[in-house]
Image (tube, rainbow, N blue to C red):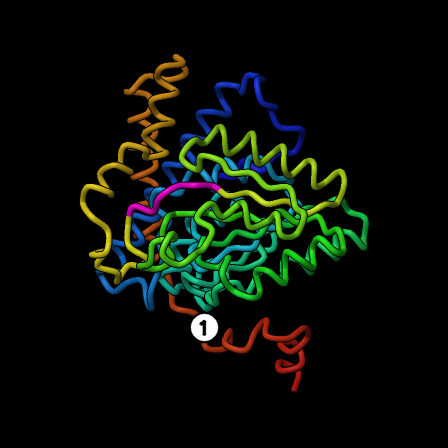
Amino acid sequence: MSLTRQAQPAQRGQEIPEATRLRLFQLQVEIRYCEKRAYDLFLQNLVKGTSHLALGQEAVAAGFAAAMNKDDYTFCTYRGHHHTLARGAPMLSVLGELMGRQCGLMKGKGGSMHLTSVEHGVMGSYAIVGAHLPIAAGAAWSAQYRGTKQVACAFFGDGATNIGAFHESLNFSKVFELPVVWYCINNQYGMGTAVERASAVKEIYKKACAYDMESIQIDGNDLLEVMHRTAEVVEKTRADSQPRFIEAVNYRSKGHSVVDPDKYRSDEEKERWRHEDPVLRFETQLEEAGVASKEDLEKVRAEVEKQIEEIVKFSDESPNPKVDELYRYLYAGEWETAKNA
């Protein structure tokens, strides 16, 4: 389900239509259930390699996508399932890709850490920390050069803000006034290291001041705040072609990857953050606002869960990638040349 907007988003203080809020809830549930199922499939050896889940980070993905235009660019880290789904990639394509099947987003050749869908503005997920930041700057430069008013948005974790590519990319984007939004998802940990142990500046958004760049910190567990504040920043950047910085503070409820035993965080800490769960918080908001009853929302959950089980069954029965797909899409024109040789 895509919530990429086609017109101006509701501004702060304006009422968001009930139908839109219900769609936002459904999108969060789709993301969460897809990721939970991905974990189960990994344990069954049906997801190959490793995988990095964004359980607990659904509000950032859903709220951000609702603030973007269809032709805007998204650049993800290896933890990119949620952003790919939020930009409109089908659940079947994503789960099929994780399972390495022909029905997958990239015909089973990319896997969990390399999800890409140009059709939906997802310009790749990158397994190397920070590798996509200079590429996002390049995409923004392309949009500026062509005068398209597109905005590039690069997501990264708190740990990436300590590497050279981060500082080079922010500096470059400011010097050349590029329409890019640098979006840090501060989930408190870079792998197993707490942010305060690895960064001299704990409040990550303050790092942008070194490049004379406007920056804000937002509650990454509040979907509506994410949507409104992201829309404000994106539209400013679209209008004046100035880079900006957002830090969304939240918490991943699982370890760094599916093989991470997560022993470095205390039970007390995890329980404290569990009360900030973005899906449950938004569910409560909908109930209190009279948008939907608990029964209505449970029905949404049940329908999504059923749909995902059907998708998993279909994917499991789908063929593996064809051997002749191996060299396809490596270089422009290569496939046609190989066929005609």
Q: Is residue 89 left or right of residue 119?
A: left
Q: Which residue is more in the foreground, 79 or 111?
A: 79
* Tag 1: amino acid: Lys
Q: Is residue 11 left or right of residue 177?
A: left
**Count of marks, rendered view:** 1
Relative to 232, say whether 330 is above or below.
below
Q: Residue furthest front?
A: 200
| Residue 286 at x, y percent in the picture | 39, 20
Q: Residue at x 81, y 53 (%)?
A: 146
Q: Residue at x 33, y 21 (%)?
A: 296
Q: Residue at x 69, y 60 (%)?
A: 138
Q: Quadrant of the C terminus?
A: bottom right
Q: Which residue is more in the foreground, 187 or 147?
A: 187
| Residue 262 at x, y percent in the picture | 23, 56
Q: Residue at x 66, y 82 (%)?
A: 340
Let me know if residue 205 appears in the view. Answer: yes
Q: Secondary structure at mark 1?
A: loop
Q: Quadrant of residue 14?
A: top right
Let me know if residue 317 appears in the view. Answer: no
Q: Residue furthest bottom?
A: 341
**Label 1, on which residue?**
322
Relative to 16, say whether 338 is above or below.
below
Q: Which span of residues is magenta-colored?
A: 248-253
Relative to 43, say whether 147 is above or below.
above
Q: Principal SS element in the magenta part?
A: loop
| Residue 213 at x, y percent in the picture | 66, 46
Q: Which residue is more in the foreground, 339 or 214?
A: 214
